[in-house]
Image (cartoon, rainbow, N blue to C red):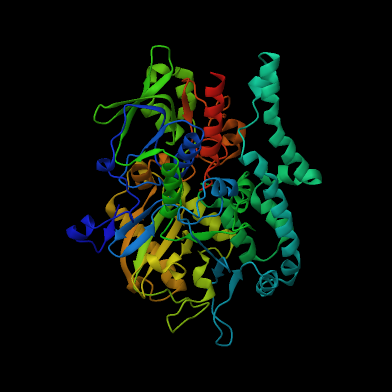
Amino acid sequence: MAVAGWTGRARQAVTSLGYTTRRSHSAVKSQYDAVIIGGGHNGLVAAAYLQKGGLKTAVLERRHVLGGAAVSEEIIPGYHFSRCSYLLSLLRPHINRDLELTKHGLKVYMRDPHAFTPMLEEGVGGAPPRALLLGGDLAMNQREISKFSEKDAKAFPEFVTHLEKLAGAIHPLLDAPPVDIPGIMGGSLTKRLVALKTLIPMVKCGMKLGNNIPDFYEIITAPIMKILNRWFESEPLRATLATDAVIGAMTSPSNPGSGYVLLHHVMGELEKEKGAWGYVEGGMGGVSKAIASSARSLGADVFTEQNVQQVLVGADGSARGVVLQDGTEVHSKVVLSNATPYLTFKHLAPQGSLSPEFLKAVDQIDYTSPVTKINVAVDRLPNFLAAPTPDGKAGPHHQCSIHLNCESVELLETAYKDSLDGRPSSRPMLEMTIPSVLDSTLAPSGCHVVSLFTQFTPYHLQGGRDWTDQDREAYADSVFGWVEQYAPGFTSSIVGKDILTPPDLERIFGLTGGNIFHGSMSLDQLYLARPLPSFSDYRSPIRGLYLCGSGSHPGGGVMGSSGWNAAQTVMADLRRG
């Protein structure tokens, strides 16, 4: 990781906005009902529900700060960043209600408008270059789209309604484990009847879809461009929509399965507004802080700086707790891992407790990541040629997800193809957000924090070599150079930066391969096959060891469903004995 503008003293000033639980506050007990490895948001959700269900629960987080990828850190003195995850939408409403997260400090700033795609072109007759601005006002959206295509402007409302119907149908599947195929096919009559209940969410999904089942099948299997080309003709609109089909995924809009990635990103809701995304006050660590506060209020113990080295497995082959880095044993009835499946089964679980066939299957899970996250501190707002604000005040477009190098699908395709050769994209796809426009707690007065979610960058560079600081700096300079094209003066406004390539995301946050979803969201790694076929129900081959992170169903995003579903599975198993 390369950070500019730091002194040694400044490095020591890095904080986590008070989201830390130091060891000295309380001691880890030797016995719990449930131990959770990792204090990411899913682990914290699981802890809250297990504790609420009467199980004495402990969360053990390796880092000095809670949240996993949903974390806030003061990387540059005075500037507080959502260092990894940076927007909220997918958090399940029932989790928000059950855990009373608003009461525990969660505050969200809604964004409207929400998407801004400026063009790199010469303005006509002295006018600024064109841009596409989209938000919650349908009439405004149609006016904006009509700058590029009247036909697309007319089609857009129907497309939004269609997409919302498909996305809404998934909700029953999010809040339940996948269908228990082995249970339905075998076992006693009682077990079969219990297993048949797992079909209910699938039936609800089908009923919600109705005649749209063929459309749903198409969008989860097809390249997103097959669908977008049917609806629209204008490049800026198609490309803007296509970014949500590839963001976080090593894929192109022309690859099968990219349609599901888009659906995954639009299926959330915020403050009862479908598909909306917002900024959490204080950064994304505010979500984790609120969940942790709720879990603690219920009686859970939550610790940072407690590095779990291995899962304890008893003579009967069942998980019996964990061993910490210092050799301390913490015993429990069950263990839940918020780590990726790869870390859980290849590093934390005793290898002798797992079959060679299972470990070989774990090795085949795809963790390819295209993402380099660059956090930037600036002393003034970017001034975009397509929407100039010379007085330095924020315009509506500054609160959006700002899509740069995204005005045509060809640009996205070229950026993807660059990375296949082990080269960072020469014209990368950039999603810029400036949360400090709405949340003044993040930066000094007049200054701002900028998040640049960039792709496509490979894990290894050409020849299989590792990233060096020089490579990081060169890539960041390329990114800043492209931002400069759209917003002249951006480079000179930079106070400091934090560059996180895929290996950095892996090393710091435990994201195997740098994959933000704990594993690719491809069709072969979803639902009944997440993380592996026959192990999609949060249980593992080791009795009493469960997965509760995004590597399990329903996958990535700050959703909480994996933690919720895992907790329900654990409690059901303990009731049955």
Q: Residue furthest bottom?
A: 125
Q: Residue furthest right?
A: 211
Above or below, comparing residue 444 to residue 556 in the picture: below
Above or below, comparing residue 409 to residue 305 in the picture: below
Residue at screen point 54% across, 60% down: 411
Residue at screen point 53% across, 77% down: 386
Of 368 and 86, the residue lying toward us: 86
Residue 421 visible from this viewpoint: no
How many numbered badges does the structure rendering display? 0
Q: Is residue 264 left or right of residue 424?
A: right
Quarter holding residue 180: top right
Of 437 and 488, the residue lying toward us: 437
Residue 110 visible from this viewpoint: yes
Q: Residue furthest left?
A: 8
Of 279 and 467, the residue lying toward us: 279
Q: Position of residue 441 (x, y in %)?
A: 38, 66
Q: Position of residue 228 (x, y in %)?
A: 68, 56
Q: Is residue 118 left or right of residue 60?
A: right
Q: Position of residue 184 (x, y in %)?
A: 69, 21
Quarter holding residue 44: top left
Residue at screen point 47% across, 35% down: 51
Q: Position of residue 199 (x, y in %)?
A: 70, 31
